[in-house]
Image (cartoon, helix red, strand yellow):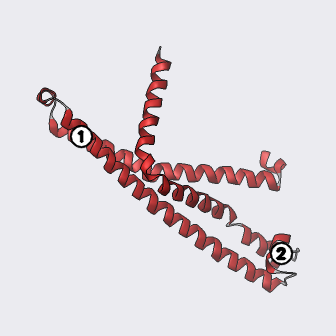
Amino acid sequence: SVRPVVLELTSSLLRFSLRLVRPYWKWLAVVVVAMLVETAMGLAAPWPLKIVLDSVFDGDPLPQAVTAIAGGQLDRFAALNVAVVATVVIALLQSASAYLNAYYTVSIGQWIAHDLRHSVYAHLQRLSLSYYDKQQVGPLISTITDDINAVQDFASTSLLDIVIDGLTIAGMLAVMFTLNWRFTIV
């Protein structure tokens, strides 16, 4: 009854969306990589603080990964320098990936809106004159323009935020389960 109609509608919308996005797959690949880097850097941001608190202030030995990267044992001052450099590198990578992410996402949204406007206006041109006798043209054009702008805003900002936040939550849960699964469950 209703379910096949909903599935058909969803399927046709998905096909239509893929047709709109397909020309921009290279830019989408850049966006996906930038999102992954941005998420990874967001998850890595507390790590230098852990080095400072545990190894510089508390005197615990440095993690093996840090000593392997630094090429041997480090004193407290060198560990602090490693943490500072790591903080700067993480911030630079996160900022660069956020910039690439925003730039390409907005560009893709602009081009998709452009393509969508072209297809909508081409469809409007094919409609019969009797259709326009029954419909007011001003509100019709205004509604179409507003709807396309809403789609563009969703594609270029809201969807990006949802995906980055979802990846960040999944990454945080993975890190927390890795560190202490019992505490994570609590």
Disc 2 element = helix
Q: Is residue 179 visible?
A: yes
Q: Is residue 186 visible?
A: no
- 27 sits to left or right of 91: left
**Which residue: 43% across, 31% down?**
12
Among the two numbered marks 1 and 2 on one chain, the one whose residue lies closer to the N terminus = 2
Q: Position of residue 94 (x, y in %)?
A: 59, 67
Give the residue number, with chain letter if any, for mark 2.
68
Give the residue number, with chain letter if any, for mark 1.
122
- 52 sits to left or right of 144: right
Q: Position of residue 113 (x, y in %)?
A: 34, 49
**Which of the labelled discs sits on residue 82, or is there none?**
none
Asked which quadrant contains residue 9, the reply is top left
**Which residue: 49% across, 66% down?**
99
**Which residue: 41% across, 54% down?**
108
Asked which quadrant contains residue 15, the reply is top left
The foreground one among 149 and 124 is 124
- 121 sits to left or right of 15: left
The foreground one among 51 and 23 is 23
The foreground one among 107 and 165 is 107
The foreground one among 110 and 25 is 25
Say what amino acid the circle numbered 1 marks: Ala
Q: Position of residue 112 (x, y in %)?
A: 37, 49
Say what amino acid the circle numbered 2 marks: Ala
- Marks 1/2 in contact by CB < 8 Å: the verdict is no
